[in-house]
Amino acid sequence: MSERTDSHDQQWISELETTLHHEFAAQTARLTELTADTGDPGEAHTNAALIAATRLSLDQIAGALRRLTAGGYGRCERCGTDIPRERLEILPHARFCVPCQQKQNG
């Protein structure tokens, strides 16, 4: 890999990490808002679903940040191959390559 490519990849990873930190903060604020008691029992079911989705999102973002720190970001947790950058740009918290994700879901 050329030095220019390495520099470009490092810049992309740095920007991605910043984006993930911002998204984590936004999701944390959202969770705080959702868990505030509104006193409206009609909203309880909807809020429970939103809280669960927000917690899942926080777990996924935290996992991506841990993989970035540990140096394992961008490698499939199942087969160890590189996850294509295009997939990571769409789904930054992806843990598996597409074939392994399909097996995981199957």
Image (cartoon, rainbow, N blue to C red):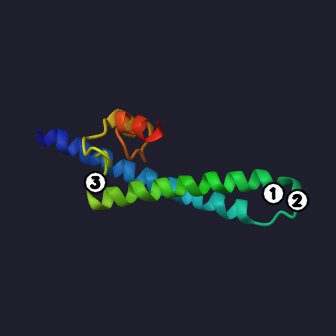
Q: Secondary structure at mark 2?
A: loop
**Residue linked to disc 2:** 40
The residue positioned 26% from the left and 57% from the top of the image is: 71
Q: Position of residue 67 (x, y in %)?
A: 34, 56
Calculate the distance from the C-alpha at mark 2 to the C-alpha at mark 1. Answer: 7 Å
Q: Position of residue 60 (x, y in %)?
A: 48, 53
On screen, residue 81 versus residue 59, left or right, reads left
5, 42: nearer the viewer: 42
Q: Earlier in the sequence, mark 1 or mark 3?
A: 1
Q: Position of residue 30 (x, y in %)?
A: 65, 57
Q: What amino acid is labelled 3 in the image?
A: Gly
The residue positioned 46% from the left and 36% from the top of the image is: 106
**Circles 2 and 1: CB atoms closer than 8 Å:** yes
Crowding at mark 2 (Cα within 10 Å: few <14, some 14-19, many 20+): few
10, 102: nearer the viewer: 102
Crowding at mark 1 (Cα within 10 Å: few <14, some 14-19, many 20+): some
Q: Position of residue 23 (x, y in %)?
A: 52, 53
State the count of labels: 3
**Residue 79 drawn above or below residue 35:** above
Crowding at mark 3 (Cα within 10 Å: few <14, some 14-19, many 20+): some
**Residue 5 drawn above or below residue 48:** above
**Circles 1 and 3: CB atoms closer than 8 Å:** no
**Circles 2 and 3: CB atoms closer than 8 Å:** no
Calculate the distance from the C-alpha at mark 1 to the C-alpha at mark 3. Answer: 39 Å
The residue positioned 32% from the left and 37% from the top of the image is: 85
Q: What amino acid is labelled 2 in the image?
A: Asp
**Residue linked to disc 1:** 44
Q: Quadrant of the N terminus?
A: top left
Q: What amino acid is labelled 1 in the image?
A: Ala
The residue positioned 31% from the left and 61% from the top of the image is: 69
**Residue linked to disc 3:** 72
